[in-house]
Amino acid sequence: MEYELLFFTQVANEDKIGSIKKDITEILESLGGKLSGGFSDIGKRKLAYPIKRNTHAFFSFVRFSLDDENRQNIPEIGKRLGLYGNIMRHIVVRAEEIGKPIISGGIKFEEEKAKTRTGGGKEKPTSPKQIEKPAGPVAETKIDEDKPKASLSELDEKLSEILEETPS
């Protein structure tokens, strides 16, 4: 059966990623795993929340297969990866649950999707759904439409500035 391992490491370990991949390969092969291909690097991404005071991490993934007799080693693989100090977090899933293999060049993140919507018109904007108004009196709130709205990337930058300025 084929599995996919996604992991991320501290950005400071980005230059050591080759040795980290070698260690992960040794862990997988020692427990009966066979790599289906090479490692694919997603790259440096911002985390949704800080993990051990890190706000960014370097993401990578690899597909591997296990024979039926070695499938019981999945918990042991998770345990060894959890004890390996260079990996912050990891997840192992069955490949059939996530579909076809993806390559790092083909991954589209929210920022890139927004660019394609505004840039080339490749995606059609969705029409807003009509919301039924409830019967009975409802307090209406006014939205200040005169103020310009900040984009998500501007908010992220401002939040990063604020977090860097506060003493830890």
Image: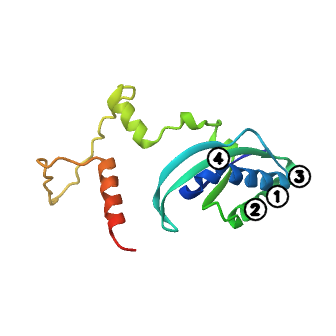
Q: Are the residues at dot 1 and dot 2 in contact (C-beta closer than 8 Å)?
A: yes
In front of the other: label 4 or label 2? 4
Report the front residue among 126 and 52.
52
Task: Check disc 3 and report the residue beneath it.
Answer: 69
The first of marks 1 and 4 along the sequence is 4
**Neighbours of disc 2 within 10 Å: few (<14), some (14-19), many (20+):** few
x 41%, y 36%: residue: 113
Helix, strand or loop status at disc 3: helix
The quadrant in which the N terminus is found is: top right
**Neighbours of disc 3 within 10 Å: few (<14), some (14-19), many (20+):** few
Specify the amino acid type for callout 4.
Phe
Specify the amino acid type for callout 1.
Gln
Residue 114 percent across, percent down from the top left: 37, 37
Q: Quadrant of residue 80?
A: bottom right
**Neighbours of disc 1 within 10 Å: few (<14), some (14-19), many (20+):** few
x 64%, y 55%: residue: 91
The first of marks 4 and 3 along the sequence is 4
Task: Check disc 2 and report the residue beneath it.
Answer: 75
